[in-house]
Amino acid sequence: MVVKEKLESLVAEMIERQIYLEDALGEFEKRFIQTALTKTRGNQTKAAVVLGVHRNTLNRKIAQHKLNGHR
């Protein structure tokens, strides 16, 4: 599986660069949400469905990561 191999490589690089788990998870979550918002043209209801989370959860995470909704 190509995605799994890319992820394993990325994780190994992050460990080598001493990036902490909390920082990595936060950045991944932020980018995952931003990409979903971009693909749904900022529609938070649709983005929540794509991400498999409740819209209130998405709204809280948008505020937590200081995202603007979409790029």
Image (cartoon, rainbow, N blue to C red):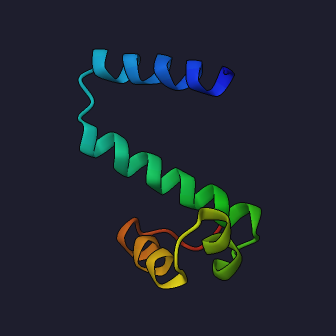
**Image coords of residue 39 (percent x, y):** 75, 61
**Image coords of residue 68 (percent x, y):** 55, 73
Q: Name the foreground residue: 50 vs 14.
A: 50
Locate residue 69: give its quadrant: bottom right
**Image coords of residue 4 (percent x, y):** 57, 25
Q: Quadrant of the N terminus?
A: top right
Locate residue 63: give its quadrant: bottom left
Q: Is residue 24 left or right of residue 46?
A: left
Q: Name the foreground residue: 40 vs 48.
A: 48
At 63% from the left and 79% from the top, the residue drawn is 44
- Give the number of marks: 0
At 23% from the left and 23% from the top, the residue drawn is 18
Q: Is residue 55 above or below residue 71?
A: below
Q: Is residue 68 visible?
A: yes
Q: Is residue 22 above or below residue 64?
A: above
Q: Is residue 71 visible?
A: no
At 65% from the left and 66% from the top, the residue drawn is 37
**Image coords of residue 35 (percent x, y):** 64, 55
At 60% from the left and 63% from the top, the residue drawn is 51
Q: Is residue 22 above or below residue 45?
A: above
